[in-house]
């Protein structure tokens, strides 16, 4: 029997094996915190899992009374090896939800290399995940930031007041911290595994808006390479925003405290 005949016989089996490997292997985990996201959760999961690159998804739900977690459990039957759920008993902040997800992923037997932060409400476009991934995988960034401000102001459906507040906050953070990041409050992120492994999560001080700033500042101080990828941020169409005055206060006063702590510890 010739090599060509042998290859013809085994080709279908090899193809199935390769397909199975592609279907089961992922080096990327997308972490999506949720609280009352029943209107968005199924759509965001399906769109993320349908991306050309194989992303696994972890939903971190804060005991949503609207049934978000129950819908995720139903979808897990359809995506048993790609969709995961971590349920927390109460709503304790965005930062602690992401930390919960980071620790879950770092301990996973899948040994993920890349970890993503993404909102559930489509303000972050899942099709941009691959661009953040490539910034880390191919362009050697340690932390890729989906940036609204690296090329002008790329936001949709925001009132002028919110644009000015957000853009002003970014300028303020750059001024206080010295980071050369145009969008330090951004929440659409890809981390290399080594960045998260280097951070002591017990020392993270902020749980809300300022959490995003603190994570970037931790990476910046540790000399990791931060890269910004231009995205368009679209305000949520369905569901209710979680932004409130206490989150903004934490960001304003917390940045100064964070910088002072760093000065005294260095």
Image (cartoon, helix red, strand yellow):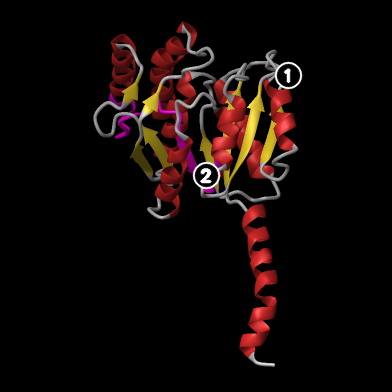
Q: Tell me if I can see residue 266 in this picture.
A: no
Q: Residue at x 64, y 41 (%)?
A: 105
**Residue 51 got which mark?**
2
Q: Residue at x 48, y 8 (%)?
A: 246
> Viewed as shown, does residue 116 lie left or right of 149?
right
> Of marks 1 and 2, which one's residue comes earlier in the chain?
2
Q: Tell me if I can see residue 234 in this picture.
A: yes
Q: Is residue 70 magenta?
A: no
Q: Residues within 10 Å of mark 1 (few under 14, many from 20)?
A: few
Q: Is residue 178 magenta?
A: yes
Q: Secondary structure at mark 1?
A: loop
Q: Quadrant of the C terminus?
A: top left
Q: Position of residue 258 (x, y in %)?
A: 43, 23
**Residue 89 got which mark?**
1
Q: Quadrant of the N terminus?
A: bottom right
- Magenta-highlighted residues: 174-196
Residue reaching furthest bottom?
Answer: 1
Q: Is residue 185 above or below residue 83?
A: above
In the picture, residue 223 is in which quadrant? top left
Q: Mark 1 vs mark 2: give the one in front.
A: 2
> Viewed as shown, does residue 8 lie left or right of 94?
right
């Amino acid at each position: 029997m010739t090599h060509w005949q042998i290859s013809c016989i085994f080709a279908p089996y090899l193809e199935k094996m390769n397909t199975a490997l592609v279907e089961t292997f992922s080096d990327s985990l997308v972490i999506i915190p949720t609280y009352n996201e029943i209107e968005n959760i199924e759509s965001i999961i399906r769109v993320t899992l349908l991306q050309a690159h194989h992303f696994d998804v972890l939903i971190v739900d804060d005991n949503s009374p609207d049934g978000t977690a129950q819908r995720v459990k139903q979808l897990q039957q359809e995506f048993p090896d790609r969709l995961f759920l971590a349920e927390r008993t109460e709503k304790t902040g965005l930062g602690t939800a992401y930390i919960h997800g980071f620790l879950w992923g770092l301990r996973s037997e899948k040994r993920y290399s890349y970890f993503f932060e993404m909102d559930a409400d489509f303000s972050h476009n899942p099709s941009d995940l691959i661009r953040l991934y490539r910034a880390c995988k191919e362009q050697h960034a340690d932390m890729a930031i989906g940036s609204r401000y690296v090329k002008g102001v790329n936001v949709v459906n925001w009132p002028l007041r919110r644009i000015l507040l957000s853009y002003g906050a970014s300028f303020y953070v750059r001024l206080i911290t010295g980071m050369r990041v145009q969008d330090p409050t951004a929440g659409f992120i890809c981390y290399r595994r080594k960045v998260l492994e280097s951070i002591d999560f017990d020392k993270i001080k902020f749980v809300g808006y300022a959490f995003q700033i603190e994570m970037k500042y931790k990476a910046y101080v540790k000399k990791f390479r931060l890269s910004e990828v231009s995205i368009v941020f679209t305000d949520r169409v369905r569901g209710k925003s979680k932004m409130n005055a206490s989150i903004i206060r934490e960001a304003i006063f917390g940045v100064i405290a964070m910088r002072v702590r760093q000065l005294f510890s260095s």
